Image: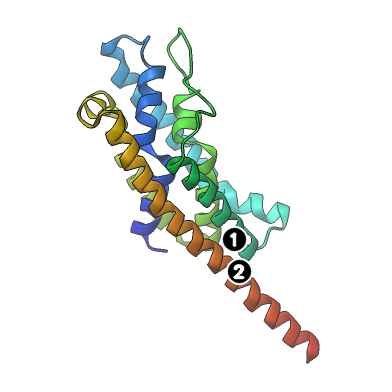
Amino acid sequence: MTILSAALLLFLVMDPLGNIPLFLTALKNVAPERRTMVILRELMIALFVMVIFLFSGQAFLSALHISEPALTATGGVILFLIALKMIFPADTHGPHKNEEEPFIVPLAIPYVAGPSALATLLLISNGEPGRWVDWLIALFAAWIVTGAILLMAGPLAKVLRNRGLIAIERLMGMILIAIAIQMLLDGIAEFAVELSTTLSQSAG
């Protein structure tokens, strides 16, 4: 995986365009002059959480004794389910109703640093842990683009309107499905190679 492909994958699972309506709802009771500062603060918190997860993911997997083929295949299934929700959205979490200024929840977690983004970081870092600098660059790139979109949430919502946002999110979901299927196939292929090697060694 290249830095660009990793950044694209992280951008897709962060789903900033799909989060625009959620951000606008969560910030509706925040004074307009404070909204930019609140979004920047929440983006920084989300980045901190994701960086921590990027560097601790390898230790987490080692402790659970999860093999790389299993993780790759599982990641493909998870991303596939995430993509399906992007194409066929269901209001499972609904707007976050809060009369106070949001802090950490729900903007930083789970809207930006959600389970899908954290799981993706786990997959990327485990595949080639020695390339942690590349993955950090990819994370920063995806985070910057995501942040720029969310900071422009109000104007973008007015320009694209609800139908436009839905159309773009579904297109992103279709791209993510293709990536998910490829990951699943890669995981199965890796497992088949490992199984073949194990059987050959046993027979020898």
Q: Is 44 rendered above or below residue 127?
A: above
Q: Secondary structure at mark 1?
A: helix
Left or right: where does residue 23 sit relative to residue 77? left
* Image quadrant occupied by the C terminus: bottom right
Q: Earlier in the sequence, mark 1 or mark 2?
A: 1
Percent x, y for residue 176? 43, 52
Tell which of 188 and 32 is nearer to you. Answer: 188
Identity of the residue drawn at 64% across and 75% down: 192
Residue type, numbered disc 1: Ala
In the rendered image, which residue does mark 2 sit on? 188
In the rendered image, which residue does mark 1 sit on? 73
* Image quadrant occupied by the N terminus: bottom left
Percent x, y for residue 169? 36, 41
Tell whether label 2 touches label 1 (CB within 8 Å): yes
Q: Secondary structure at mark 2?
A: helix
Q: Is residue 80 visible?
A: yes
Callout 2 environment at 10 Å: few (<14), some (14 to 19), or many (20+)? some
Q: Is 182 rendered above or below residue 19?
A: below
Percent x, y for residue 147? 32, 34
Percent x, y for residue 92? 54, 29
